[in-house]
Image (cartoon, helix red, strand yellow):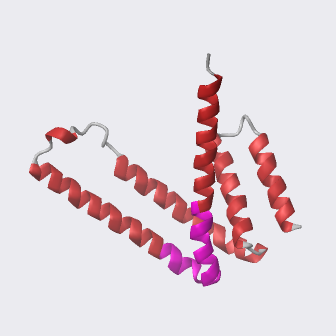
Amino acid sequence: MKKSILLLLFILLSLTGFSQDKHEKIKALKIAYITEQLDLSKSEAEKFWPIYNKFDESKSALREEAHKDKSDIDYTNLTEVEANAMLVEMKTFNNKRSQLYNNLITDLQKVISAKKIVLLKKAEDDFNKKMFEEYRKRQHSEHKNKP
């Protein structure tokens, strides 16, 4: 029953809401997909989603910070000093990202089982793969339909 409801939600969200922002639709699909894959109870979901959403927001902010002002860099003419400074930034970013994931795991261990935390990574990877495949399929069909 729960899976049928989530499947119906998934289908409805993918077919409706042209006025709804694309990112919000994807987020709703991801929530439904992860909830179903982890088989979260209502009680688990109430505790899980605030932790996960905070993590997701922090991850997005970190990604934006890492890509900020990178389009203006002339990589072919970098000096060794500039390249070394960039490497320090890259290492700092990687450390922040690792710490963010470690904090997520620690926080989630308080509210869901270790198995569900492991399944979360698989569910995220599977969801991202499905989204990428859908994107490629749509791009292919758009190019195919152009005169």
Residue drawn at point x = 10 percent, y = 51 percent: 80
Identify whether 96 is placed above or below 29.
Answer: below
Residue drawn at point x = 51 percent, y = 80 percent: 106
Where residue 77 appears, as percent x and y from the top left, is: 14, 39
Q: How many marks?
A: 0
> Which one is in front, 88 or 107?
88
Where residue 112 appears, as percent x and y from the top left, is: 65, 80
Where residue 27 appears, as percent x and y from the top left, is: 64, 52
**Residue 111 appears in the picture as rendered:** no
Which residue ends up furthest to the top in the rendered image?
Answer: 147
> Which one is in front, 92 or 5?
5
Span colored in magenta: 103-125
* Left-right relation of 43 to 4: left
* Left-right relation of 85 to 28: left
Identify whether 135 is placed above or below 63.
Answer: above
* Left-right relation of 101 to 66: right
Rendered image quadrant of residue 118: bottom right
Identify whether 127 is placed above or below 41.
Answer: above
Which residue ends up furthest to the front in the rendered image?
Answer: 144
Residue drawn at point x = 22 percent, y = 53 percent: 86
Where residue 45 appears, as percent x and y from the top left, is: 71, 71
**Residue 113 appears in the picture as rendered:** yes
Residue drawn at point x = 70 percent, y = 60 percent: 33
Which residue ends up furthest to the left in the rendered image?
Answer: 80
> Which one is in front, 35 or 48?
35
Main SS class of the magenta portion in the image: helix
Rendered image quadrant of residue 54: bottom right
Whether residue 123 is in magenta: the answer is: yes
Q: Quadrant of the N terminus?
A: bottom right
